[in-house]
Amino acid sequence: MTFKHGGVMSLADKLKNVEPITNKSRCAVCFTLSQLSEADASALNDALKIPVDSPSRITDRQISEVLKSEGHDVSSNSVYRHRQNHLEK
Ligand SMILES: [Zn+2]
């Protein structure tokens, strides 16, 4: 591959270097899970996995608030994204 502008990266290369938003290293929930004790991490995973149509569903905001109360900086948006992209099916 040749570069038209010397050392400047091509658009194609730039796109290749963009980290996908689903990248787990950038996910606050995945990061928090990696920091928690095994018991806490599995409790959090269980809470995250409750299906939307279940009466015991805990909302993204509720999970975010519990995590924040424990000192973990996790927004409800992060919980939402994690639920969309990172839950084991
Ligand atoms: Zn995640």
Image: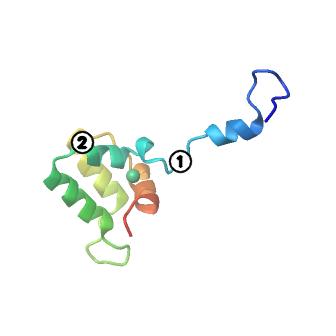
Coordinates of residue 81 in the picture (x, y in percent):
45, 55
Report if the CB atoms under discs 1 and 2 are less than 8 Å apart: no
User: Label 1: which residue?
Assistant: 21
Single out the residue that lies furthest toward the front: 1
Residue situated in front as seen by the camera: 71 or 3: 3
Q: Residues within 10 Å of mark 1 (few under 14, many from 20)?
A: few
Coordinates of residue 57 in the picture (x, y in percent):
30, 70
Q: Is mark 1 on a helix, strand or loop?
A: loop
Coordinates of residue 39 in the picture (x, y in percent):
14, 55
Single out the residue that lies furthest toward the top: 6
* Residue under the point 32% across and 50% down: 64
User: In the image, is 58 to the left or to the right of 84?
Assistant: left
Q: How crowded is mark 2: few (under 14 residues within 10 Å), some or many (20 or more)?
A: few
User: Label 2: which residue?
Assistant: 35
Decide: is 71 above or below 39. Answer: above
> Which numbered dot is residue 56?
none
Q: Which amino acid does label 2 sit on?
A: Gln
The quadrant of the image that shows the C terminus is: bottom left
Residue situated in front as seen by the camera: 42 or 56: 42
User: In the image, is 21 to the left or to the right of 80?
Assistant: right
Q: Distance between the residues labelled 1 and 2?
A: 21 Å
Residue situated in front as seen by the camera: 26 or 12: 12
- In which quadrant of the rendered view does residue 46 lie? bottom left
Q: What residue type is labelled 1?
A: Ile
* Residue under the point 28% across and 77% down: 55
- In which quadrant of the rendered view does residue 8 lie? top right
Say which label, 1 or 2, has the lower sequence index. Answer: 1
The quadrant of the image that shows the N terminus is: top right
Instruction: Tally the marks.
Output: 2
* Residue under the point 74% across and 40% down: 12
Coordinates of residue 31 in the picture (x, y in percent):
33, 43
